[in-house]
Image: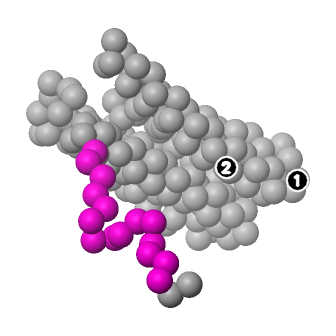
Amino acid sequence: MSDDKPLIDDKSFTVKVPNRAVELLKEFKTEEIIFFMIILLSVIGVGITDYAPMESWAYWMFMVTALAASAVVIEKTLLHRKDVSFTKLWVTQLLHWGATLIVIILSFAFVKTGRMTYEGSGLVILLILSLSTFLDGFHVGWRFYLAGIFLAITSILAAFVEEYMWILLVIAIASIVFSTYLEKYLTAKENEIQES
């Protein structure tokens, strides 16, 4: 058995991958990882809001910043496909997420003045984030549409279902699986179009 040679010699084995494929793979990984993180951070935020609503405001402020940074990173990777300067992209995202942040701050002002409860404010913030994320999908891509829908479903579940965390986890996993398969499908379609 010691005379057996491996089928593949690591030193001589090379795979040539077209530059376009490497480029698509890098974009896929960046966008997909960011999408996974958005879903994960959303689930964590719902848990924080559910168990410590008075402390959740800081987390949602962080979440707005994380979503804004995610949008800029994704758009920057796609910049070569668009005829837009990075400055315009940055200003667009700054206005979009800056307005979102202001509305979230106002919702906490309603809590402080007694017009709204912490729990109610958490649901409103989820709806604000879902709308902002969904609308930013126009600029960033379909994953932000999907993340916005996920956040909207999350707020509905939190409002109407007593034990919703398990349902939320199932929906989060389903969203990630759906996103992965949709990406593979869209990539295959794009490759078909380029080949023909």
**Residue at position x 87%, y 56% in the image:** 163
**Which quarter of the rendered picture does the N terminus lie within?**
bottom right
Residue 192 locus on image (x, y percent): 40, 19
Residue designated by label 1:
162
Camera-nearest residue between 9 and 36:
9
Magenta-highlighted stretch: main secondary structure? loop
Asked if residue 141 is positioned above or below residue 90 in the image, the reply reads above
Q: Which mark is residue 172?
A: 2
Q: Is residue 148 magenta?
A: no
Asked if residue 124 is positioned above or below residue 80 in the image, the reply reads below
Q: Give the magenta part as a residue range.
A: 3-17
- The CA span between labels 2 and 1 is 18 Å
Residue 72 locus on image (x, y percent): 28, 46
Q: Is residue 189 visible?
A: yes
**Residue at position x 44%, y 75% in the image:** 5
Q: Is residue 104 left or right of residue 10?
A: right
Q: Which mark is residue 126?
A: none
Q: Is residue 75 visible?
A: no
Residue 181 locus on image (x, y percent): 58, 37
